[in-house]
Amino acid sequence: ETGYITYDPGYANTGSCSSSITFVDGENGILRYRGYPIEDLAAHATFIETAYLLIFGELPTRAERQELRDILSEQELLHEGLRHHFEGFPSNGHPMAILSAVVNALGPYHPDLLEITSKEDFLRAAAKIISKVRTIAAWAFRKAQGLPFVYPDPKLSYCRNFLHMMHSIPYKQFEPTDAQVRALSLFFLLHADHEQNCSCSTVRMVQSTEANLFASVSAGICALWGRLHGGANAGVIEMLQNIHDGDLSIQECLERVKKKEFRLMGFGHRIYKSFDPRAKILRQAAHDMLASTGNDDPLLDIALELADAAMSDEYFTERKLYPNVDFYSGIILRALGIPVNMFPVMFAIGRMPGWIAHWNEANMDEAGRIHRPRQIYTGNKPRKYIPLDSRL
Ligand code: SDX
């Protein structure tokens, strides 16, 4: 009478799935991409090497890495028709709205890639998305700033090219330091995949209908936008800024969190119940980057103090709440001159290889079925129609 629970042994109704891409052990704070510990990749790999690993399953040889670099350079320009999309957005339009719209619009400009039937097609489509999201993101930023668009420079590496499109001005190319480029590559690498998180599951859900790669990734961008997911990095900086501006002390912040007036952004995780290994790496990277550029950011000091206070408070430790990937990442982005409303966009650029790898894994699965989660019905019992004049 109150509803039925139907369990289907297959994937479609349980919402969980098998995958060979990323392994997460939340109790022990372990994260591995295709078997490689995140700590090793963070110490030795670049973002583009890691993208290749996630998508194709192996670290690239020198030749394979160069081949990927070359195709990313070939694919970095946007069709001029797509440039006009930016004119249609208001200058205060959120860059995540622009990113999801223009990524989806890549489909009509590449109709031959709406249905992928070969490894060559897949590589071209993947490269288009991974390369062009930089251009789309940078142009969304430039539009909001009222600055002229800067075109990509094929001579520059992936991260240098992005920073060039973000910050160069006519006749004066932006020259990031090696430490800034390394920090950006590390930021993207640490965000590259995280198994079946909300946005990845969205990409796989949309793929299961046999929708194309561009539409599936665009849906992932929309899911990532939320404050509890990819929007948390912006929430962390807003919270730290409030503390810095004296609107809030650290103790008051924790007390208001305990009263459930708001959540401690950048803390807690559905899977990690000990520590998020990415947060540990980013905490050190933020410190090193500021030290290398001789800058200091008072928000980092506040973040460190807040984290220490929370992690010695049983309200948080009882609930197994520790810093997650978003808690320190904003410090690095601020030091790169990235505005807060672009933080989720930066997360999305990093996550592209993971979404693409999962889309391809699902797309290659001959036994793949459309996702159709079931529900527990809690509505009305069966009842008869009431004629209009009889309704009170
Ligand atoms: C990402 O899934 C992924 O892998 C995601 C991600 C990825 O790489 O894709 O890792 C990226 O999304 C990281 C998370 C970023 N979001 C935030 O930092 C937002 C703040 N954190 C939360 O809102 C929360 O911790 C979640 C959403 C991350 C996880 O939420 P859960 O697992 O659903 O936890 P819950 O809501 O069941 O909370 C359990 C308890 C509750 O307290 P009680 O009701 O038992 O008293 O913990 C409390 C919650 O109130 N709690 C928090 C808290 N998070 C949970 N209390 C204060 N501050 C927080 N941040």
Image (spheres, rainbow, N blue to C red):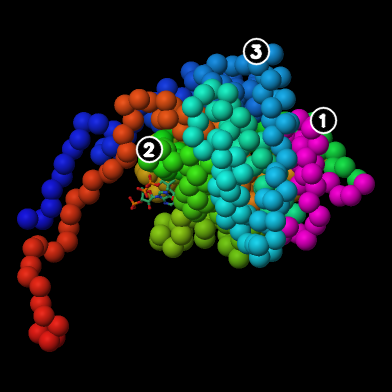
Drawn side of residue 308 relative to residue 378, left or right: right
The stretch in magenta equals 143-171
Q: Earlier in the sequence, mark 2 or mark 1?
A: 1
Q: Which circle marks residue 61 in the picture? A: 3
> Residue 68 versus residue 266: which sits nearer the camera?
68
| Image quadrant where one finds the N terminus | bottom left
> Residue 38 versus residue 161: which sits nearer the camera?
161
| Image quadrant where one finds the C terminus | bottom left
Placement of 143 over or under 45, stated as above or below: below
Residue 166: percent from the left, percent from the top? 76, 47
Residue at 29% across, 33% down: 11
Q: Which residue is mark 1?
A: 155
- Report helix, strand or loop for mark 3: loop
**Dot 1 amino acid type:** Lys
Task: Sort mark 3 into few (<14), some (14-19) or many (20+) by Cα contacts within 10 Å.
Answer: few
Q: Is mark 3 within 8 Å of ligand 1?
A: no
**Dot 3 amino acid type:** Thr
**Dot 2 amino acid type:** Ser
Measure the C-alpha gap from mark 2 to mark 3.
32 Å
Residue at 17% across, 61% down: 379
Q: Which circle marks residue 380 in the picture? A: none
Placement of 324 over or under 376, stated as above or below: above
Residue 221: percent from the left, percent from the top? 52, 47
* Residue extending furthest toward the front: 112
Residue at 21% across, 31% down: 9
Q: Look at discs 2 and 1 and give the one toward the viewer.
A: 2
Q: Which residue is mark 2?
A: 208
Measure the C-alpha gap from mark 1 to mark 3.
21 Å
Asked if the magenta segment contains residue 160, the reply would be yes
